[in-house]
């Protein structure tokens, strides 16, 4: 576990900000008929224009700037030339390197009307992210984070993806500790001041079971039902979790009124 100084956390915050702005820029472009490869090109240009580097491109050989995972695709989808359709849900995960530090977060977007079931899946998955983050306090253990997510999700009939997890974040995209979206209270590494992590619940409408496609990347649900993914970057500063990323650019682009980030801040005041 690599703990960060306030200066280092500041650099991760800057990198996370560029990811947040990239996702905000993409939000107004997502509509039926456009392709995930088009979104990928926009994101790459935007990141380079901001004098940053895409964090995922070339990482373990990943070919693109964004992971774009549609409907039954959970994460690690490779952008392609298939047009988006009305009713799709589109998870976009974006990584950036700025000044040697990574930002890495994700949001699941709606294309037009996605119907009640998917709507609810998105709402609950995002809520579970904030619930997980509330457990990120010094003295808690990694297991407390997953436990809080699991307890919340268990009230709904959803599947928690177990094979993929959140992680520490810094000069490396993936650092210790791994942060599963399930777990036992009091188990796992002790959380400490200066820890920076990505928490990222991946929640399936149906079975928790997943499969990897032959492309060597794309993770899909075994039953073909949709999956949602939300991710924030968070640092432990002065005994509480501070979210370094923001969805506010997405909400601005989409005209959504949301007080979720303010509510989260005031929870710890
Ligand atoms: Mg990510
Ligand atoms: Mg991540």
Image (cartoon, helix red, strand yellow):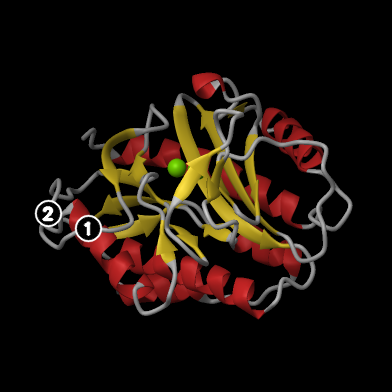
Element type at mark 1: loop
Q: Is residue 109 above or below residue 118?
A: above
The residue shown at (51%, 57%) is 230
Question: Residue at (22%, 58%) from the top-left corner?
Answer: 183
Query: Which image quadrant: the C terminus?
Result: bottom left
Residue 84 position in % (x across, y down): 81, 52
Could you say whether the residue bearing mark 2 is in a helix, strand or loop?
loop
> Residue 91 location in percent, x, y?
62, 52
Q: Which residue is mark 1?
A: 183
In the image, is 152 to the left or to the right of 100? left
Whether residue 26 is visible, yes or no, is yes
Identify which residue is drawn at 21% across, 35% down: 1
**Residue 28 image point, x, y percent:** 79, 57
Give the number of marks. Answer: 2
Q: Are marks 1 and 2 in contact (CB under 8 Å)?
A: yes
Cα distance, mark 1 to mark 2?
8 Å
The foreground one among 209 and 172 is 209
Label 1 C-beta lies within 8 Å of the nearest ligand 2 atom: no
> How many other residues sit within 10 Å of disc 1, few (<14), some (14-19) or many (≥20)?
many
Res 72 quadrant in image? bottom right
Would you call the spot at circle 2 few (<14 residues within 10 Å), some (14-19), or many (20 or more)?
some
For image coordinates 39% across by 27% down, the residue present is 172
> Where residue 187 is drawn, which disc sits there?
2
């Amino acid at each position: 576990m690599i703990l960060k100084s306030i200066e280092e956390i500041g650099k991760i915050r800057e990198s996370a900000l560029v990811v947040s702005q990239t996702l905000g820029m993409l939000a107004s472009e997502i509509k039926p008929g456009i392709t995930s490869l088009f979104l990928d090109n926009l994101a790459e240009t935007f990141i380079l224009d901001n004098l940053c580097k895409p964090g995922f491109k070339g990482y373990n050989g990943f070919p693109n700037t964004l992971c774009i995972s549609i409907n039954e695709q959970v994460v690690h989808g490779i952008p392609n030339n298939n047009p988006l359709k009305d009713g799709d849900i589109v998870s976009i995960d974006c990584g950036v390197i700025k000044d040697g530090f990574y930002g890495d977060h994700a949001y699941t977007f709606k294309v037009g009307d996605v119907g009640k079931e998917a709507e609810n899946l998105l709402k609950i998955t995002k809520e579970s992210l904030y619930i997980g983050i509330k457990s990120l306090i010094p003295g808690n253990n990694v297991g407390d984070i997953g436990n809080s997510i699991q307890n919340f999700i268990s009230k709904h009939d959803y599947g928690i993806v177990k094979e993929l997890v959140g992680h520490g974040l810094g000069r490396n995209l993936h650092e210790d500790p791994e942060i599963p979206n399930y777990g036992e209270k009091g188990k796992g590494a002790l959380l400490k001041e200066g820890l920076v992590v990505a928490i990222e619940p991946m929640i399936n409408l149906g079975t928790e079971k997943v499969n990897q496609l032959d492309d060597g990347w794309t993770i899909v649900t075994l039953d073909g039902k949709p999956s949602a993914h939300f991710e924030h970057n968070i640092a432990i500063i002065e005994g509480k979790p501070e979210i370094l990323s923001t969805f506010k650019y997405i909400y601005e682009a989409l005209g959504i009124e949301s007080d979720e980030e303010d509510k989260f801040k005031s929870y710890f005041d």
